[in-house]
Image: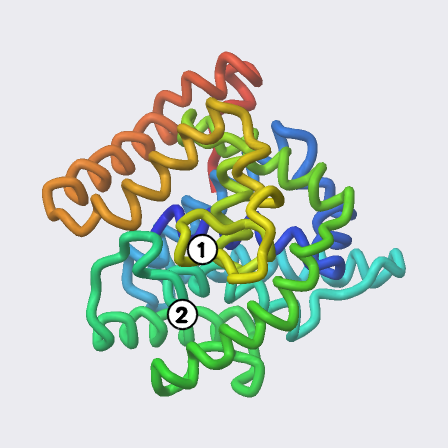
Amino acid sequence: MMFAMYLGLVAILAIPSVLKILIYTKKSSPTEAAYKRYIQTIFHTLRWFRYDLKPGTIAWNSLETVRKMHLYASCSASSAKVGIISQIDLSITQFSFMGFAVLFRKELGIQCDNNEMEDFCHFWRVIGHLHGIKDEFNVCCSTLEETEEKLQIIQKEFLLPQLTNPSEAFKEYSKFIISGAQCFDILDYYEPIVFMMKRLIGVTGYHYFESEIPPSFDRKNLKYLKLSYLDRVNLFLSIISRQFMLKICIIRWINNFGTFVAEFFVRYFPFIAIIRFGVRKAYVRI
């Protein structure tokens, strides 16, 4: 689930209107600022998951903080004639947090039935509403089928065209995000992460298994063949572990335990960030 959100946060940088706001706020570059923003996003999201969404609670205060940040960024960018955070931008941002988990749960090793996924979508429907997304723009609907239909529209009409021919700004800022995120998971490398993201979105050439390759596609143009040996190994382990090994409960327990350990260290002993940015800037608070 964390990895699904991670891919979504990288993918959303391909949307020009969203990226312009991020560039203007100067909170996603260089690597140090991207690290802080990514870790703050994790901490806020974990509060929404772990605490009751009631006025006065930790989760509620976190939601108010994020909404105020969005409002300030939108007003400031509007005054500078950069643009605003529109309802469409909020919908795409909502996709970035939950879209990969819903559409590609089998590929990412998320084990759940449709009832559990409907509960997950209801949660994000509420989160979207509390963030100011109007009902007609909320990608999470009353049924899982409707939600998947809306998510596929965003995937095919917004993300796929932009990720097929990404801008130089996307390449630059996605590198900042992934480099900063390595302070949470040191095994995250740029090329395998981008490959995983584009493969799931459906970008031509980013195929891995033989069954995914279109009949008329020239195999010489497969993108993974152009990766370095280290990146190929990383990609292989990432795909195999999630798509197949996470079906085994013991492997999931180990994976989840590793995520809790990573969270503990980045929250209390962020030694990787300390080495890279210094003690004062390594600790992130919200």
Image coords of residue 138 (percent x, y): 51, 79
Residue type at mark 2?
Trp
Kindly indicate the quadrant of the structure image that contains residue 153.
bottom right
Q: Earlier in the sequence, mark 2 or mark 1?
A: 1
2 vs 65, nearest the viewer: 2
Residue 219: mark:
none
Q: Point out which mark residue 62 bears.
A: 1
Q: Give percent across and percent down for residue 260.
A: 26, 37
Residue corresponding to mark 2 = 124
Q: Residues within 10 Å of mark 1 (few under 14, many from 20)?
A: many
2 vs 1, front mark: 2
Q: How far apart are the alpha carbons under marks 2 and 1?
A: 15 Å
Q: Which residue appears farthest toward the left when viewing the image? A: 250
In the displayed structure image, the side of residue 69 where residue 286 appears, left or right: left
Amino acid type of the residue tagged 1 in the rendering: Ser
Name the residue at 65% across, 55% down.
163
